[in-house]
Amino acid sequence: MPHKLAFKVTHASGQDEVHRASELNYHSPLTKGWQSARYCLYPQDIVVQLEKRSRLRKIQVLSHQYLIATRIEFFVGDVPDGMPVDLDNARYTRLGYVSLSDNEKTGFKARELKSVQVDAVGVFLKLNIHKNHINKYNMYNQVGLVAVNVIGDKVQKGLDALDELDLFSERKKVLDDPSLEGLYDRPDYISPLDDLAFDMYQDPEIAQIIRKLEKKKQEAVLQERYEYAKKLKHTIQELQKVGEKLGKYEVEKRQAVENEDYDKAKLKKAQMDEYRLQIYRDLNVHDLMETTGSRHPQKIDLESIRHPASSPPLFDLPRTPPSPPPRTPYDERVLPAVKSQVGHSPLSPRTRTPYDERPLPIHNREPATTDNADNSPRTPYDERPLPVGKKIVSVVEEEVEPPPPESAGGGITGEPEPLSEKDLREASAAIDIFGEPLVSKAYSKTWSYREDALLAVYKQMQELPTSGKQEAKDMLRASLHLMKRAIDDKVYAVFKAGLMLLKMILTEYIPKHKLPKSDTTFTLEKTLPNLLHKSGDTAVRNRDDAKNFILECASMSEVKPTMVVPHECVKPWKGNPAPRLAQSRGEIVETLYEQLGIKDSKSGLTVDNMMNFCVVALNHTSADVRVVAERIVKALYKEVGQPVKDYLPADDEKSRKNTMWRLLFEYFDKIDGKPSKSDVKRQKADEEARKQQEIEGLQRQLQQLKDMASGKAPVDESVLEKKPAVKKPLTNKPKSNKPVTKGDEGDETSVYNMDNICIFCGEKNPTFTEEGLDLHYWKNCPMLKRCANCKQVVEIASYTDHLLTECEAKANYAKCPRCTEAIPKPEHEGHVAEKACNAAKAGTNHCPLCHQNHTSGEDGWKNHLMGKDGCKQNPRRLLALNKQPPAGKAGATTSRAKPAPRLPKKTPR
């Protein structure tokens, strides 16, 4: 069975003077750990040597809270047979690496524990530690490890293997039940006591005792001594809490010594000794260890072997008083419940007996602190976060006084602490009905008292006769306050007792006393908010039990007609609640919808109240909450259709920019049998791609014609007669693609009709079909230009307006009040302040290319952008001048080819 392997550090490439590598050889709350030298070179190497050649199963590394490496690589080293076990003879095999978090999310107040499962054999383990994460606390670029742990099996050879086989056979002889084979001897079982988190936060002496008791518990199970094993389990649980508390005291004592506060150190030492002695006495640790070797499961007199004079010392632990009272044998003894400063675990086994016959717990011998974290339920070590203080390890902030001398003897008392003035006022109604002693237990800091008080209320309400209805009402209202406290209780047993009491009231108490529906409604209105809040609890079982109980209430025969549960659950929340709470609420509403539906008018659910809830949930910051709300909306749309859209944003381009709304609307389109807008866009893109291919084909044909006209290529009649592969023009008259000859000059309009003319610059060309004009607009027309931002083709005359009102990047531009041009916002303030721009004048046009003023009107724009002495910043002007015919012919042609005024002036895109 894998176990913790002892090792020692044999090599370190560097170390800090205070935090040396030898600190990694030991695990305790006082361990300082290793830190690299300041401004060291990376990577850093640490090599540890195991006691014997072993098979490694698990490697654990506890990183420093802010001296954090980015990566740690692991190598296992072995020595070939026949060579001495020496670091120089080691041959290493790379196992892999782990990456460490930069710890910014925790504010550098928590340490990261990395556990790696491996399967390798060797004598050495090398850690290759890479450069550090950069943060404000790591001023010298160091890396640090607080602890390293290695778990595995020693590789046995020769006689050692035979000895282990004999020992294993001897242990198997105690098994009478074949089903118990492999219970603790599984090859893959790793004890939680070997985990690094156990030793780092446990007092070393307590940790050693816990391991001894765990071994005895395993032997007791194999011997079927279950009562003894149960006592050992309870003791181990209590000692774990005690060990953590003593570990904190030890850290406080060390800090006091470092601060030369010796009075405080002496006080802490006395407090630890007294606390340790009291715990050993209360838990009967010496007797449970069975130091005389007596393991007989029968009832025997153990008084003679428990006398202090004849008992050998156990790790030099403090002894019990010399005259102990008579005790019963182990397997029949009632184990006392110890209440320590670290709190009573709600998971501790406790024999269920009637309320009036339960043994009273032993009270604590030392004052309780205000450490709320100590009262929380214990969690498995593999799931426990590792808290860390700012200086050494996690440190208790408050001062804890030593226990008073008169309380050393202890005593048994059954009275809970008295109620405060505030509690007396708050619970006055419950005190009038149930009495102050019972309510005091309900308010006690001991969870077992609180549970017992609820069971007592349960019993009294069940036994109440049905004669007086008013008395039943008074008792019901008095119990509500105690139930609400129980539902909010952090201890699971108390919470379950509160649920049991509430269920009894709803299903038995109210029908039995024939109370009206208003009492049922009042009960639910008082308790449901607490249950809904509990459904967001961090503990999974608390959360699940609260949700299941709410759903169970909704289907109860006495509760369903009131419709209180659905109405409370679909109320939209205010603000932005915690993600876990909001997600649980959404899951409850989703299940209620599946169970009750909206068709039944008595279900309490309607499209209106559910959609109001979903709209709020869809705007939550957590993706998990939004996913639940989306499922509800989709299910509602499947059932009712269009009314769902009335509660959602309009289905337009602005809404569809949001991924969530786009997916929802596409789902609606799919349900309605319509193609989604994404499908339409895809079809449009395919159409544009086909159109682009046609334009490219036309461009190639035009280039061939130009080459033939310039004499660069021979005249090809097939090219001249070939019709362009473009769409048929939208005109009723057929076009003639015949070239113009000298005899046809007077009838030039037979070739050039209105569809072959650019409506912006007036150029005529028989190739100006729909696709040919697009090419002309895109590349050649001197009146147009492409926008540098959105790549659309716009008129130069309206380019400024386009940038300010139409362009996709219009938010990046602002208008200059002097020159009226569109200026990028980062430059706008300086541009206006300099006043160096050419001011626009009334009655003229202002060119956005050359920034000059010129004649107003359309003819003014044409002369400026196309004329010989026009805009020097228009690159298409010279190309247009080269294409113009002689002046005499141009005038006649222009007059005849002038675009008809009926054609609208448009901005091509």
Image (tube, rainbow, N blue to C red):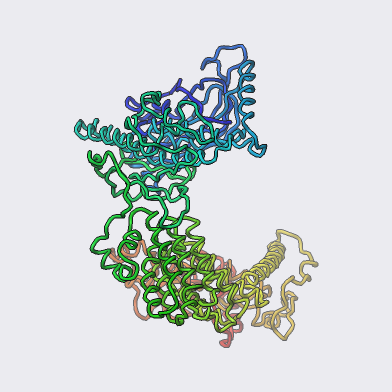
Instruction: Please state which of residues 646 and 398 is positioned toward the viewer in this rendering.
Output: 398
Q: The N terminus is located in which quarter?
A: top right
Q: The C terminus is located in which quarter?
A: bottom right
x and y percentages locating residue 831 in the rendered image: 32, 64
Q: Is residue 784 visible?
A: no
Instruction: Please state which of residues 702 and 1 is positioned toward the viewer in this rendering.
Output: 1
Q: Which quadrant holds residue 386? A: top left
Q: Residue at x 43, y 23 (%)?
A: 12
x and y percentages locating residue 698 in the rendered image: 70, 67
x and y percentages locating residue 282 in the rendered image: 36, 39
x and y percentages locating residue 277 in the rendered image: 32, 34
Q: Residue at x 51, y 77 (%)?
A: 558
Instruction: Please state which of residues 837 and 885 is positioned toward the viewer in this rendering.
Output: 837
Q: Is residue 426 left or right of residue 730?
A: left
Instruction: Please state which of residues 102 and 802 is positioned toward the viewer in this rendering.
Output: 102
Outermost residue, right side: 718
Give above or below for 327 relative to 508: above
